Image (cartoon, rainbow, N blue to C red):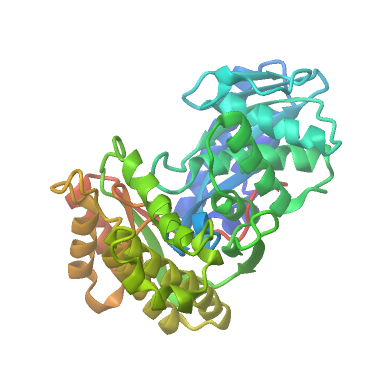
Amino acid sequence: MKIQELTQHITSGGIDDELRVLYGDSEQVLSAQRARYCAAIQKFADTFPNRDHVHLYSAPGRSEIGGNHTDHQHGCALAAAVNLDAVAVVAFHEEGVIRLMSEGYSMSEVDLSDLSVHEAEKGKSIGIIRGIVARFAQMGVKVGGFDAYTVSDVLSGSGLSSSAAFETLVGTIIDVHYNDCKAGEIEIAKIGQYAENVYFGKGSGLLDQMVCSVGGFVFIDFNDTENPKVEKHNFDFDKAGYNLCITDTKGSHSDLTDDYVAVPSEMKSVAQHFGKSVLREVDEKEFFAAIPELHGKVNDRAILRAIHFFGENARAIHEADALERGDLERFFTLYRQSAASSANLLQNLYSTTKPTAQGIPLAIAVSRLILGEYGVVRVHGGGFAGTIQAFVPMDKTENYAAKMDALFGEGSCYVLRIRPVGGTRII
């Protein structure tokens, strides 16, 4: 659709049905999204003045729900796509180049005749783009090229996976336009992971990309890492009367690498005692029987973290089942158990190297004081610093958000909803 025509179409409510699916029914939200999309289209026009015919794409961020630090042990996890997303305005051409500008960043330009790994591009979005195209090329897909302008409200460094949203966005653009959607949601996630691992230089798992690509609640069993089992669940928390709230405690992730590395390495030290590489390969009964033998051979925290893994792995399965059955009470019971296990066994609420910086425990404690019996709260994502997650009754959300903002600063609490679809073209 031509730029002026599309802008008028959006302003007059022409894509409201699609926007309701992605962002909710609130007229205030719809109005804000119309303005956001129109602004992105104008930025595209300013950046690429020789393009007139454009398309719209969107890919969501995600929030981990259950299975805290289980994926790297080939375990099970439950996560959900959220209504914060990355949006792209795209014009296609056959010039053999991709030009992509993300709001606030410089232009990335990828010559499609060169799809080799560039060491200088590792850690940069241009590496992600080149890697995604390279993977499609390996699949026999010919990409002509496109110009794109992207905007994103997925918080960087928040555990909401802004990088996976971007990877899903680029993968969806290419799959829809150049591949007739043949790759599909799961393969797009794998393509994003490949680009991040090989071209971006980060050894990430598949959880983030899979949830951003599939949408809704997604249960993933990583027992077979090459072909993980993926199940989509569609429990409607809006109808149940709850909002998903993510609060940024403003904790710094700097100097926390050792904390993050210690979690999988300690779990693997337990697995190695049994001649296995990851805990998923260890028989649970054999592990519990061997705890006296393990004591003194591995450190105590490693044993506690292994206990967390076995319990958390099972809980993720039961949480997904509870959602599938619509059993909210059981889900919340399991959620509370998961929160306690992360705090007491996994021990990822704060860093022992910074014992006085306890933003996450503080946020959780204050949340429980505010909500009492009417909500559930836990650490969000990798932990040690950053964000917490809470399911909050709708009639208590305004008060909860205001008090969390008062504690951590205006705009710290994000009131979200579960987005039922992943990467998509907006028609």
Q: With 3 as the anchor, is 338 left or right in this view? A: left
Q: With 246 as the anchor, is 349 left or right in this view? A: left
| Rendered location of residue 77, percent (x, y) | 52, 63
Residue positioned 37% across, 80% down in the render: 333
| Rendered location of residue 384, percent (x, y) | 29, 50
> Number of labelled discs?
0
Q: With 241 as the anchor, is 109 left or right in this view? A: right
Front-lying residue, 150 or 132 = 132
**Quarter of image, res 251:** top left
Residue positioned 52% across, 51% down in the render: 30
Residue positioned 29% across, 47% down in the render: 385
| Rendered location of residue 179, percent (x, y) | 83, 41
**In the image, is residue 256 above or below residue 106?**
below
Q: Is residue 190 visible?
A: yes
Front-lying residue, 269 or 304 = 269
Q: Quadrant of the N terminus?
A: top right
**In the image, is residue 366 above or below residue 386?**
below
| Rendered location of residue 274, percent (x, y) | 49, 64
Q: Residue furthest left?
A: 356
**Quarter of image, res 164:** top right
**Quarter of image, res 155:** top left
Q: Is residue 4 visible?
A: no
**In the image, is residue 427 above or below residue 365?**
above
